[in-house]
Amino acid sequence: MNDDLQFINVYSALIAAVPELYPLVAAKLNKYYDLANEAPAEYPVFEDVVKPLVRKCLENTADRQLAIRLFQFLERMATSSDSGVVTLLRIAILEWLAFDAASYDAAQKYMGPTTAEYVKLDRRDFQRRGILPA
């Protein structure tokens, strides 16, 4: 079975991997999308639903199993051959982790190697450009 995520199916793969996200997506995005008939756009799902849930998991150690499953999915995204999937991940989730030192520190134990490398690259780039303190 090919486990390579493609941009066209990243939302359905996310919901399959973390089904408890669906009610959160519905609550946040139902006024913009007819979720019974269409999938929401990927960026609002990841920026407005996934990122806040990742933040909550990192702040609350009771959500450890959910954090593990979320970061396993993020690692699948990081290793995708589809640049659209990787760009979605980097913009919607990893840039925030690169900027937020406390969240970055908490996330390190959950990140896979490719996800961690992308965050390190972003942090170095932000430091080089003077956006993030060295």
Image (cartoon, rainbow, N blue to C red):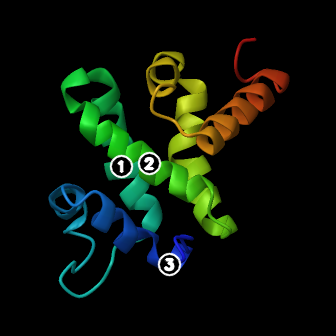
Disc 3 secondary structure class:
loop
Q: What amino acid is found at the position of numbered circle 3 in the picture?
A: Met
Q: Which of 48 and 120 is in front in this view?
A: 120
Quarter-of-image position of residue 11: bottom left
Q: Mark 1 points at which residue?
A: 50
Disc 1 secondary structure class:
helix
Q: Mark 2 points at which residue?
A: 72
- Quarter of the image for the C terminus: give it: top right
Q: Residue at x 22, y 78 (%)?
A: 35
Q: Which of 13 and 39 is in front in this view?
A: 13
| Left or right: 80 in relation to 54 | right
- Which mark sits nearer the N-terminus, 1 or 2? 1
Using the rendered image of the protein, determine whether residue 22 is visible from the camera's viewpoint: yes
Disc 2 secondary structure class:
helix
Q: Which residue is drawn at 44% across and 20% down?
A: 106
Q: Is residue 45 above or below residue 81?
A: above
Q: How crowded is mark 3: few (under 14 residues within 10 Å), some or many (20 or more)?
A: few
Could you tell me how far apart the alpha carbons at marks 1 and 3 are, in whole angstroms?
26 Å
Q: Which residue is drawn at 47% across and 61% down?
A: 43
Residue 120 percent coordinates (x, y): 70, 30
Q: Nearer the viewer, residue 134 or 117?
A: 117
Tell which tag, 3 or 2, sits nearer the viewer. 3
Q: How crowded is mark 1: few (under 14 residues within 10 Å), some or many (20 or more)?
A: many
Residue at the outermost bottom position: 37
Quarter-of-image position of residue 121: top right
Q: What amino acid is found at the position of numbered circle 1 in the picture?
A: Val
Could you tell me how far apart the alpha carbons at marks 1 and 2 are, in whole angstroms?
13 Å
- Which mark sits nearer the N-terminus, 1 or 3? 3
Residue 77 percent coordinates (x, y): 54, 58
Q: Mark 3 points at which residue?
A: 1
Q: Answer whether labels 1 and 2 touch (C-beta < 8 Å).
A: no
